Amino acid sequence: MNWLIEWAGYLPQLMSGLGVSLMIAGVSIVAGYPLGLVLSVMVQHRNLAVRTLGLAVVEIGRGAPALVILYLFYYGLPKFGIAFESITAACLALIWNSAAYSSEIMRAGMQSVARGQHEASAALGLSRGHTFFRVIMPQGMRSAIPGLMGVAIQMFQGTSLAYAIAVPELMKSAYNIGSQDFNYLQIFALAGICYAAISMPATWITVYFEKRLARHT
Amino acid sequence: MDAFSAVLQGLPMTIVLTLSAFAIGIVGAVPLAVGLSSSNIVVRLACRLFVDLVRGVPIIVWLFLLKFGIQVGTFKFNPVGAAIVGLGVVSIAYLAEIYRGGLESVPRGQNEAADALGLSRGTTFLRVLVPQAFRIVSPSIATYLTGLLKDSSIASTIIVAEMVFQSQAFARQHPTMEGILPYVLVGILYIVLSLPVAYLSRSLDARMRKAVYA
């Protein structure tokens, strides 16, 4: 019971942190997915230079830990006179992360569109742009939906790394409360519950969509 | 000392963290995967709740919970212990989910055939289901290992002296332009380290495919 009363006292402070976490996750998704789409097209481009650039951006974004990219933006770039506020650095790093991961999922989705669709579009005399935007993309995106939802959950959890550059998100608020009265166990457990309260239902919804899509194909 | 050797100083710790957590996960996930596909609904739901809860909380929260929150008598986790246990438990949950997917993808007929041959449940599981499931999941396990390698960087937040921690230490001592180098190098090093795992997974996958369809 004591725990519950203490938790109720901590909750308002944690909620403002959760708001920041959700904001960063939202920005990284809203800006990251369109960039991911561009990257997925670049990676399949005929021009070698475009393809290589796209591949490099995707492979670094997926291959290097998000924490390293975060530090690169926050501690690394200022040494060249490019300084960001901590929250901007966090958003930029996670945008890169989400663009890289989502581009792979979108590419896989678009490659799963049957070849006959390309041939049929060509036979109908559709332009390449038309074929991509009106035929391939709508079908490919549909099968990419569960994967993209998975990346969104991953991004939300990834916002906890912004703690390391002192962004006042959920983890940082929890740490601040904890270092006031040393109730680390209670406060981190509550922080964990806050993350789980969003991630777990989101995962269940994703699984539901996965099953639904599998039924239709 | 140059940036590269500074980063390399953390390499052994990164490898120790990754492999210890992976070892915990590989073994610990087996009973959990069996529980996830159990016919007893209570066992199944309990295992499902555990897996979803562990995966629903970011790794950094688990590490802080273990490092700062756990105190039993005089026992407290040291940073390395907290990192290994934390990453290990998370690996158990993720790998159990991968195992379960593999077990479910083995055709039902295999189970029935083993039953018809009069094999015991243990033999059926170990000699019929597991070998086939392993072929299916080995690429996913390798992918998870590369993910774990990257996640081990989070241990730097609880002061474990692995690669990212060493990069930061170097960058702090070099406020000039040179200070960006360790971050670039450590990023490249993570990508380079995951290449052999990806290669191994691909060749393993190719060999397994041959074994199945020969």
Image: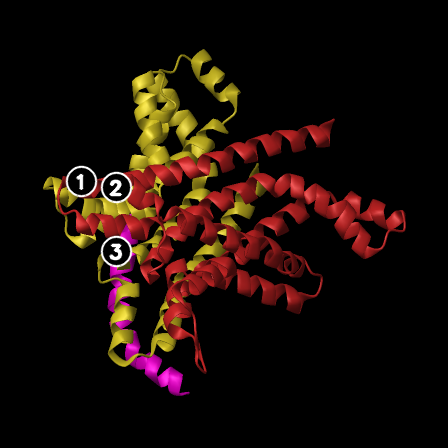
Chain colours: A yellow, B red
Give coordinates of residue A31: x percent, y percent: 26, 42
Q: CA distance from mark 2 to mark 3?
A: 35 Å
- Give the extent of the magenta segment: A1-29
Of all residues shown, which one is farthest toward the front? B1
Residue type, label 3: Met
Viewer-side label of 1, 3: 1
Residue type, label 2: Ala
In this figure, which residue is indicated by the disc labeled 2? B3
In this figure, which residue is indicated by the disc labeled 1? B178
Labels 1 and 3 in the same subunit: no
What numbered label is drawn on residue A11?
Answer: none
Q: Residues within 10 Å of mark 2 (few under 14, many from 20)?
A: many
Left or right: A71 as drawn, with respect to B26: left
- Can the viewer see residue A27? no
Depicted A140 relative to depicted A200: above or below: above
Tell me the SS state at disc 3: helix
Which secondary structure type mostly characterizes the magenta part of the structure? helix
Tell me the SS state at disc 2: helix
| Residue sitting at x 45%, y 48% | B15
Q: Quadrant where the N terminus of chain B lies?
A: top left
Output the chain of dot 3.
A
Of the pair B89 and A146, the residue shown nearer to us: B89
Does the magenta run of residues contain A72? no
Tell me the SS state at disc 1: helix
Q: Quadrant where the C terminus of chain B lies?
A: top right
Q: CA distance from mark 1 to mark 3?
A: 33 Å
